[in-house]
Amino acid sequence: MNSQLHKKLWLIFAQTVTICLALIFVLRLFSPDLIESILNKKPSTVLVKQAEPSFSKIQSGSYSQAVKKAMPAVVNIFTSKAPPENPHQKYLDDPTFRQFFGDQFDDPDNQAQPENSLGSGVIVSENGLILTNNHVIASADEIEIALSDGRKMSAKVVGTDPDTDLALIKIDADNLPAITFASSDKLDVGDVVLAIGNPFGVGQTVTQGIISALGRNHLGINTFENFIQTDASINPGNSGGALIDANGNLVGINSAIYSRSGGSMGIGFAIPATLARQVMDQIVSQGNVTRGWIGIEAQDITPELAESFRLKTAQGALVAGVLLDSPAAKAGLRPGDILLSIEGKPISDTGAMLNLIAALAPNQKATLKIARADAMLDILVTIGKRPKPVAIKE
């Protein structure tokens, strides 16, 4: 039995050696480098696909590719408003009046002319939706759009949001070059941005700069402010145009400038693309923008107030007044309370408080953390719907 077992083991060993020698012979014949590397114990080489040498302008500091991607989606907007009617026109048109006084009251040099203004906009859908500033089209009787390919079309208003100074208009066209949205929440101070618009009506223009600051508020421009500040040149006519990143994606809608002369001084403000998209989606889906509201008047916490209320930092919003029958009143909020957070999100000042409340949906229940006297309390409030601003009649 042992001799038979030894013979079988020897046979297996011989066959294994024979196969290995044959394999080495084949490899030696067809791939000598591999055998050499194994014998010398050299590491094998990883083959990678080498990119072709590029001599594009992007490598030399140009943003032409970003501009080529975004510029076709930026349009020029021309608006006109009919002149106010002359309250005495009915007398001037009266034949009896003219019989006695003739045409001496007709002065063609002093006749009222239509008011014209210009701005910019961004195509956000292939079927003709255009995002712009509300102040660009707010008082317009006629809106004309000039596309980058030279076509001109009339536009109609789909919806507006004066609180953020945004408006959505539409032209009857298809297969238009729509902008690509980027997440403005991922921006950093120092990022390169480009502004595209129609400054002073000279034609489509591109300027370059960086993001100077984020989250700018308390500027008195809009009700809800969370501006991107940039030093890219923005001038009259740029309003409603695109602020894009170095890849040609939309990061903001150019809205306002700080200027003592009317021209650019290196301080421009743009509405973040994330906010613009939220407003646009609500206008498309329901025709208007709905925001949360609790019905309080608030003021910022100054260092003096923080010291008097024994707060560690000058953060939060002091409740100065509570409207009767408002959600805040029903929840038990009182003047003198200090709002510290909403749904776990800290409140730095009244601007942040306003934005956080506005982002909540009506009828949603939210938890407010407040400081009252020396105690910290959680108050549950049912969010209401922010009322529309009352128009002031002159």
Image (spheres, rainbow, N blue to C red):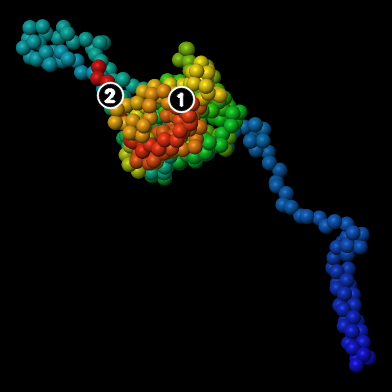
Horizontally, is 98 left or right of 376 in the view?
A: left
Quadrant of the frame with the C terminus = top left
Label for residue 373?
Answer: 1
Is residue 390 visible in the rendered image? The answer is yes
Q: Is residue 104 above or below residue 80?
A: above
Please state the horizontal and vertical placement of residue 122, each as a whole percent of the image: 44, 34
Marks 1,2: beta carbons within 8 A? no
Along the viewing direction, whichever of 361 and 70 lies nearer the viewer:
361
Quadrant of the frame with the N terminus = bottom right
Residue at 59%, 28% (x, y): give it.
Answer: 189
Residue at 13%, 13% (x, y): give it.
Answer: 92
Along the viewing direction, whichever of 13 and 138 lies nearer the viewer:
13
Please state the horizontal and vertical placement of residue 155, each as a whole percent of the image: 33, 34
Along the viewing direction, whichever of 335 and 152 lies nearer the viewer:
335
Q: Residue furthest left?
A: 96
Residue at 59%, 32% (x, y): give it.
Answer: 188
Amino acid found under the numbered disc labelled 1: Ala
Packing grade of label 1 (10 A; few <14, some 14-19, many >=20) is few
Specify the quadrant of the image occupied by residue 67. Answer: top right
